[in-house]
Amino acid sequence: MSAYGTSRHHPPSSFATSASVALFRRLAWEGTVPLEIRVDPKELPANSDRGLECYYIQAPRVSYLPLLMPELRRFLMDVVFDDAAARILKEEDWWFESEEGALLKWHWPIGLIYDNHAISASARTSSAASISTGTGTAPELQITPLKLILHLASPPTEKLLLPPSAEACKQAFMGQLKEADFIRWGNTKRMTGLRKAEQDGIWEGIREHNFDDYWRVASKIVPTTIPATRPSSPPPSSSASAHARPPSSDPQNAQDRDGAYNVRSVPVRLYLPDGPVIQDLAPPIMEDGTPNTLTRYLSTHLPLLFLSQGPTPDLAFPLVQGIILPPETEMAWLGACMAGADGWVNVCVGLLQ
Amino acid sequence: MAQAPGSPDEPGRQMSLPGESGEGVSPAIQALETYKKKDPSKVIVRFKAVGNAPIMKQNFYKITAANRFQAVIQFLRKELAWKAGDPLFTYINLAFSPAPDDTVSNLYKSFATDGHLIVNYSTTAAWG
């Protein structure tokens, strides 16, 4: 996957064709992460089959932990627990922790949980480096299973914030979609304009991990970088694409009011290792008329880590959907192609040291 | 701990950054510590009842920006003397429910109206 994020020869804006938007949306959607789920050995019921208490899954980045529960439960009940234990155990009491003891939230996309864990590891100097850096080269991520501990009792409800049900997760997801809509346009008309069946359909698309079902509805709310009206452009050819401009820099396309370059702000959150989440407005076009880029956004909000303009190299790197992005990536393109299913671009910031 | 090359014992020689975290800590970690500091500033939150939710006598509060939205919900429940389990739905700008782990600071930066973060509350679910 990382090969796509490091193709520096083309500015992202030259990817503003319908085929490439569909391609990147598909790549983001199909992204999966390896999880190793282990029942806390101290909580394993008597007579459990101890050889098998580990469950491995390649989970979709856009999915959520509550959506994995039915499959996980089936495995544990069928293979690991005996009938007596299966009768007593209540799924409502189950909850997850990372190996390091960090609580995993029900309402975070699984891809975000995975990336957030990777950047937190990057800040622990003693930990085995999951991110290796050579001098002068981009860091390389090593994909290893994220180890989760499954607890079977006494959930810390206050800290988990939400009950572990798929329904609560759906409500939180809808809230995030609406918040993203509000960030983009200053209202939630596009979301509230969806019929009930469409709102349910978008969630079913995630539950079933069905790209077409999800995007059939999501395309009504997530703006695209493709110009709505194509001015008399020559047929695509290699020479024509060399002259392709982003819609933003072409005043002729100003009527493309619903486009990714016309939103008030791109929904974006910055995640720092073991800590703060920073959310602020990210207009797609700067006051000087040039597209806002990831490096501009990062050096404005995290100037101590991203010193891009100076002689000193950056102290950190941005990870979106598991990919280390080139600094010149445009924010509008990120919002259109690399956002999570909830509409948010989650930028995890890892440390280089 | 990682040592800055060539300056294991002399913090004075390390690159100086606003983070104050002592010796032998990499500049990246120092920068991170700075961003982890809690914002002590306060912002004005204005509560507005929706539907037949009870109106608050005082509806302006200064709330520490570093708080999570969950703390605002708990504060509101306390002010309304709401019992555990009684339904209370909270929204920003009559539009959406934020994630409970989002901070007041983040919400204020993105959604404040005339210097206030407007929090609507309702006894029934509204706006989907």
Image (spheres, rainbow, N blue to C red):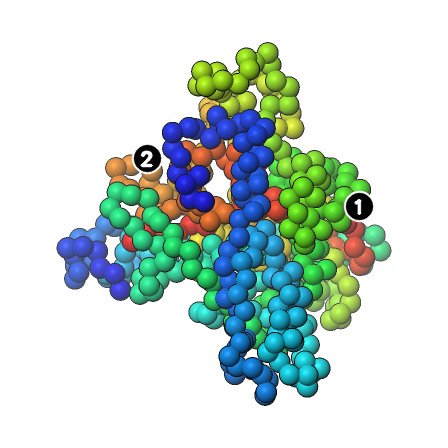
Horizontally, residue B39 falls left or right of residue A185, namely left
Residue, far bottom = A46
Q: Residue at the right extreme?
A: B52
Q: Which residue is mark 1?
A: A197
Q: Quadrant of residue A231?
A: top right
Of all chains, the one bearing label 2 is A
Residue under the point 57% across and 39% down: A25
Give whichever of A276, A96 is nearer the camera: A96
Question: Alpha carbon of mark 1 to alpha carbon of mark 2: how far?
Answer: 48 Å
Q: Circle 2 sits on which residue?
A: A309
Residue beneath the point at 36% across and 58% down: A130
Q: Which chain is indicated by disc 1?
A: A
Q: Residue B110 appears at what percent x and percent y?
A: 58, 43
| Image height of A291 relative to A54, above or below | above
Residue A249 relative to residue A341: left or right: left
In the image shown, does B43 or A240 lie closer to the viewer? A240
Mark 2 surroundings within 10 Å by alpha-carbon count, few (fewer than 14), some (14 through 19), many (20 or more)? few
Q: Work out whether A334 lies above or below A48.
A: above
Image quadrant containing the N terminus of chain A: top left
Question: Could you tell which of marks 1 and 2 lies nearer the N-terminus?
Answer: 1
What's the amino acid at mark 1? Ala
Mark 1 closeness class: few <14, some 14–19, many ≥20 residues within 10 Å: few
Residue found at x 77% / y 63%: B87
Residue A261 in picture, x, y percent from top left = 56, 28
- Coordinates of residue A46 in the picture (x, y in percent): 59, 88
